[in-house]
Amino acid sequence: MKNRTNAPCGVLGPRSFDGVRRREQAFTLIEAMMVLLLSVMVIGAAISLCLTMNYTTARQAYYTAAMSICEGGIADLRAYPYNPPNYPFESGTIVLTNTNYPIRLAQGGSNFVVSGTVYSTIQPVGSYQHLVTVMWTNGVPGQTQDSQPLSVSLQTIVNKYSAGQNFQQ
């Protein structure tokens, strides 16, 4: 039996009318390996993306919690009546330290995973105003899922016109 090109079917295989060999209906081994390689790369990238997002959101949660502690420290210092040279707005620089300020509990809720120290610095700048700096830092590498310590600080100026002060002329 002969096909249209007059060649036996078993010798050259099926040919199209223009003499070019037709493609078989199955995938070759190289095509299958390329698809498998691309699939593994996409799955690996998706896993890497999920891990990176988890790390980034956890780090952002630490920053947010530490920032709220600093904001609370500034609010505490603004609650004092501004009456220099009385405490805490004295004529020299004052540093207040509070240790073991936690920002994250363990999953069981019984112990702190990440805790740090709050440093509040009050220093006079000019006449009748003080620069207040509140900084939270853990200072221990590796405690926040990476090798860098976490440190957050806020500053404000407090004077007799600041919010929370009863200014009377």
Image: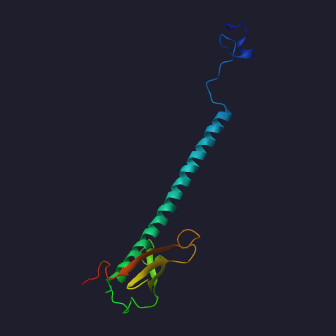
Tell me where residue 9 appears, x and y as whole percent.
70, 13
Tell me where residue 35 appears, x and y as whole percent.
61, 38
Q: Nearer the viewer, residue 76 or 84?
A: 84
Q: Is residue 32 left or right of residue 78?
A: right
- Quadrant in the picture for residue 89: bottom left
- Position of the C terminus by quadrant: bottom left
Q: Residue furthest left?
A: 168
Question: How many labels, in total?
Answer: 0
77 w.r.t. 12: above or below: below
Q: Is residue 159 left or right of residue 63?
A: left
91 w.r.t. 136: above or below: below
- Position of the N terminus by quadrant: top right
Residue at horizontal 57 percent and vertical 68 percent from the top: 146
45 w.r.t. 89: above or below: above
Tell me where residue 44 appears, x and y as whole percent.
58, 50
- Quadrant in the picture for residue 71: bottom left
Tell me where residue 145 appears, x and y as whole percent.
54, 68
Q: Residue furthest bottom?
A: 86
Q: Is residue 4 left or right of residue 61?
A: right
Q: Nearer the viewer, residue 127 or 163?
A: 127
Residue at horizontal 57 percent and vertical 71 percent from the top: 148
Q: Nearer the viewer, residue 125 or 12?
A: 125
Q: Nearer the viewer, residue 13 or 50?
A: 50
What's the image's color scheme? rainbow
Residue at horizontal 44 percent and vertical 79 percent from the top: 134
